[in-house]
Amino acid sequence: MLAVEREQELVLFYAVAAFVSFLVGLVAMARSARRERKPALAWVNGLAAAAVAFTLVDAGQFAALR
């Protein structure tokens, strides 16, 4: 395996780890907003979590095609 390929794998791993942490944080904020009875804030956080989840799935499909 070439060093460049290894570096690309590490960058992809870092990006996935960052997006997973964003997703977990957004889901936690949405749950907290629901508990505090702030539906608008819960919807915003839920929508953002859905966008991050879509990005993760899309990145996963891109990585599988490589």
Image (spheres, grey):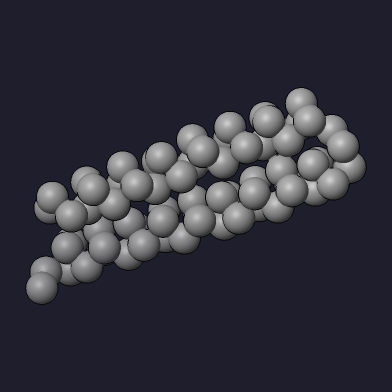
Front residue of this view, candidates 14 and 61:
61
Residue extending furthest toward the bottom: 1
Q: Residue at x 84, y 46 (%)?
A: 35
Q: Where, quadrant-wise, is the N terminus in this rendering? A: bottom left
As drawn, 26 above or below 64: above
Q: Residue at x 34, y 58 (%)?
A: 11
Where residue 24 appears, as percent x and y from the top left, is: 60, 55
Q: Residue at x 49, y 51 (%)?
A: 19
Where residue 48 appears, as percent x and y from the top left, is: 58, 35
Rendering quarter of residue 7: bottom left
Labels in figure, total? 0
Q: Is residue 14 left or right of residue 37?
A: left
Residue extending furthest toward the right: 36
Q: Is residue 60 left or right of residue 33?
A: left
As drawn, 38 above or below 24: above
Q: Is residue 2 left or right of residue 49?
A: left
Residue extending furthest toward the top: 40
Where residue 51 appears, as percent x and y from the top left, is: 49, 35
Q: Residue at x 18, y 55 (%)?
A: 64
Where residue 32 appears, as percent x and y from the top left, is: 80, 48
Front residue of this view, candidates 13 and 1:
13
